[in-house]
Amino acid sequence: MISGSRDKKVLGEILQYRFGYAGEKNGITIRMWDVETGELLQTFNGHSNDVNFVSYSKAGDFIASASVDQSVNIWELPIPMQ
């Protein structure tokens, strides 16, 4: 399973929404999980604002995410999802 997440602490949220400052460690992540065990398999960083969409390719060898920061990121997975 792939998820989009915001992991900022409260101060980071206040700074971003009040002043537009995202900082270097903005807490926006894409995560790949093992559904059966709940284990976090991999974390992807690359967006500077909320992630609105995540998906994986039909073959399971790429994931894509789209963000409020007006970017789309694509990552090749080292081991295709099954």
Image: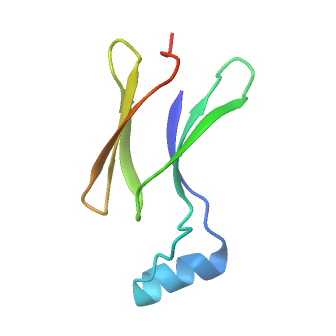
Q: Residue furthest front?
A: 78
Residue sitting at x 40%, y 19%: 61
* Quarter of the image where one finds residue 31: top right
Q: Nearer the viewer, residue 73 or 20?
A: 73
Q: In the rendered image, which quarter contains the N terminus?
A: top right
The x and y percentages for residue 20 are 40, 83
Q: 70 left or right of 38? A: left
Residue at 51 percent of width and 23 percent of height: 78
**x and y percentages locating residue 33 in the rendered image:** 62, 29
Q: Is residue 33 above or below residue 54?
A: above
| Color theme of the render | rainbow
Q: How far from the left and from the top, in percent, is residue 41?
A: 65, 30
- Residue 4 drawn above or below residue 35: below
Identified at 61% across, 60% down, the residue is 7
Q: Along the horizontal axis of the image, is 6 left or right of 60? A: right
| In the depicted structure, whether residue 17 falls above or below residue 79 | below
Q: Between residue 61 and residue 10, name the one nearer to us.
A: 61
Note whether 36 is above or below 31 in the view shown: above
